[in-house]
Amino acid sequence: MATLHTVQGGVTAPGGFLAAGIHAGIKPAPLPDLALVTSAHPGVMAGVFTKNRIAAAPVLLCRRQLRRHAGRAIIINSGNANALTGRQGMLDAMEMRTLAATHLRLPVQSVFVGSTGVIGRPLPIRHIRRAVAPLVRRLGRAGHRQAARAIMTTDTVCKEIARRAAVGRRVLTIGGMAKGAGMVHPDMATVLACLTTDAAIAPRALQAALTRAADETFNCISVDGDTSTNDTVLCLANGQAGNPVIRMGTPAWNTFYALLRDVCLSLARQICRDGEGCTKLVEIVVGGAKTDRDAGTIARAVATSLLVKTAFFGEDPNWGRIAAAAGRAGVAFDPAGLSLSLNDTPVMRNGRGMGDRADRRARRVMRNREYTVTLSVGNRRGHARLWTTDLSRDYVTINASYTT
């Protein structure tokens, strides 16, 4: 596998990309709430979206537009989800797209739209009308940070990353920014993410790489068990690296996929680490299941258990909650073969606890900001890995007054 290098620049690290963020007036001043990412050259676009039956207007618009697999720019607002807003919501999403296309002098179909924020309120499109022109004037390589800030909602930190790797004789770069702190759960995990790359890649190959990468990263995190109406991950490839076009089933595709997955995993972990009110990031690893699907089902049951998550918060080595969550997942396994450990500390082996001394060691592990819970449910090959958070008092406080 090619060596991956971290580079600065987020979404503008790949060649040919510019970005900007601005305060449009959707959120209180001076918070930035409108972001724009654009390529100097036409590119290939791929996307994955929420599976929630209630999808926001921008999601519906992007899904329809993605059939062309071509793009040039992405405009995103925060502070308003433009979801459950009826026909006017779709008209507003289309106007947002048109405004960006007009000021960028691009075809309308080359601009994609994203929104995030409170559900059910009309998008204040008048603010966006006034803000797009100055937003375009701010575009630059240095604009990646402000763009990443402009898509935040309850996030406490902006989330961005860029990685680089050699593919053959060329060096490819992938950059990304994302938002997400609450309503985060697999299927899609509730995120808004924009990925950019200077790779030359066939549309089918890019979509396959993004779908697989999302399944193994964004769909493997859970903060609170809720999914959103607005989940969107878009990836734009402009081909400026000058590499031969990457196609499915080639060594170049494998390397590109590994690079893309690495970027997505970094963003996914940043989202989980910044989960609303969370104080812990816990990796859940399940092995020995009959199939990967079975292992994933068990991992999700553990990752979403409120009793488990509150034990994480309280640093309470109540491993019985973890075992009980695994047992109610609906997957057949022999309880007498169940083993469980926290980091390298076993607390249960072959269906029986290891005693008070093991529990005391486990408590010390749980004082860490990050650690791993590993369950073995048998001797088969099924395996899964998810990331979850604790559930703290602050989560309730944040979400009890979200609209006020």
Image (cartoon, rainbow, N blue to C red):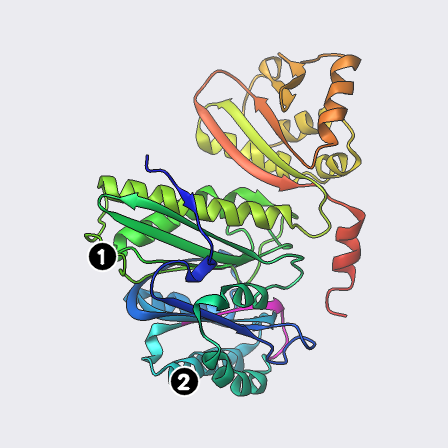
Q: Residue at x 58, y 14 (%)?
A: 337
Left or right: where does residue 16 sit relative to residue 225? left
In the displayed image of the protein, which residue is found farthest to the left?
Answer: 244
Where's the C terminus, which quadrant? bottom right
Could you tell me if residue 101 is visible in this image? yes
Label 2, residues with CA under 10 Å away: few <14, some 14-19, many ≥20 = some
Query: In the structure shown, which secondary structural element does the residue marked by tag 2 occupy?
Result: helix
Do tag 1 and tag 2 residues touch (Cβ < 8 Å)?
Answer: no
Local packing at callout 1 (Cα closer than 10 Å; few below 14, some 14-19, many 20+) is some
Residue 233 position by quadrant: bottom left
Q: Which residue is mark 1?
A: 242
Which mark lies nearer to you, 1 or 2? 1
> Mark number for residue 103?
2
Left or right, 124 with reference to 66: right
x%, y% of residue 223?
64, 47
Q: Position of residue 265 (x, y in %)?
A: 49, 44
Task: Name the residue type under label 1.
Answer: Gly
Magenta part of the chain: 112-122
Q: Earlier in the sequence, mark 1 or mark 2?
A: 2
Residue 78 lies, in percent from the top left, at 59, 70
For label 1, the SS is: loop
Q: Is residue 236 above or below residue 356?
A: below
**In this view, 150 is above or below 289:** below
Assign the magenta stretch its main secondary structure: strand
What label does residue 59 carry, if any? Answer: none
Front residue of this view, candidates 58 and 100: 100
Give me the residue at 43% from left, 22% from top: 381
Identify which residue is drawn at 80% across, 48% down.
Answer: 393
Give the CA distance from mark 1 to mark 2: 28 Å
The amino acid beneath tag 2 is His
Quarter of the image that includes the N terminus: top left
